[in-house]
């Protein structure tokens, strides 16, 4: 069973995510690019990259894989989607790619796509008395996964 990918529009990706994603159905803001995952010419998944949700990571060379949604039973489709977006980001000149999973998820797909586990990150609400925000869809703790371009690692020496 082999997969292929091709670009997808923001509207088509949002529509698919609203229908298929397990727990995050609201639209993503900060869209950069996305791909649809195909098996035998039929769409079995969608993945999208956006500006990082953490404002301190918004440096123009960092992107975040914000949604991956595949049909139930499509083995390895998530790993393929993460890998496809990671390679697309690298081709576009991004040096860092982040994504987040729920704390209890094991992250097999992210690991298979070349991401490293950076541990538990954040969670909670962004609402402040002086800066009201709408409720977060998943306020619990998240696990952050990262991929770094070889040029970034060379510049920094290592992680």
Image (spheres, rainbow, N blue to C red):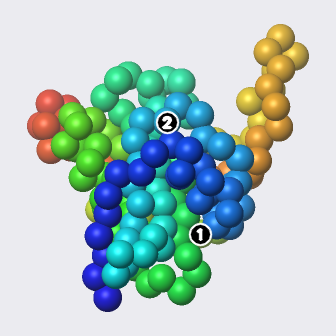
Q: Are marks 2 and 1 in contact (CB under 8 Å)?
A: no
Secondary structure under the numbered disc 2 in the rendered image: strand
Q: Which residue shows up at 62% across the image and 54% down it?
A: 15
Q: Which residue shows up at 36% across the image and 44% down it?
A: 97
User: Outermost residue toward the front?
Assistant: 41
Horizontal and vertical percent position of residue 138:
74, 51
Horizontal and vertical percent position of residue 24:
69, 55
Q: Name which quarter of the figure residue 115 lies in.
A: bottom left
Q: Can you identify the residue that label 1 sits on? A: 105
Q: Is residue 19 left or right of residue 2?
A: right
> Label for residue 31?
2
State whether residue 82 appears in this view. Answer: yes
Q: Is residue 66 left or right of residue 133?
A: left
Badge 1 local density, few (<14 within 10 Å), some, or many (20+)? few
The N terminus lies in quadrant: bottom left
User: Outermost residue toward the top?
Assistant: 130
Precedes in sequence: disc 2 or disc 1: 2
Q: Is residue 4 left or right of residue 18?
A: left
């Amino acid at each position: 069973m082999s997969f292929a990918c091709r670009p997808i529009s923001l509207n088509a990706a949002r529509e698919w995510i609203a229908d298929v994603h397990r727990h995050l159905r609201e639209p993503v803001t900060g869209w950069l690019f996305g791909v649809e995952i195909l098996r035998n010419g039929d769409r079995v998944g969608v993945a999208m990259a956006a500006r990082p949700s953490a404002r301190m990571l918004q440096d123009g060379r960092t992107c975040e894989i914000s949604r991956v949604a595949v049909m139930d039973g499509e083995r390895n489709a998530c790993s393929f989607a993460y890998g496809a977006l990671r390679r697309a980001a690298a081709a576009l000149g991004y040096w860092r790619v982040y994504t987040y999973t729920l704390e209890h998820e094991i992250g097999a797909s992210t690991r298979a796509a070349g991401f490293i586990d950076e541990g538990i990150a954040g969670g909670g609400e962004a609402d402040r008395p002086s800066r009201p925000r709408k409720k977060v869809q998943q306020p619990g703790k998240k696990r952050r996964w990262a991929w770094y371009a070889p040029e970034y690692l060379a510049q920094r020496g290592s992680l």
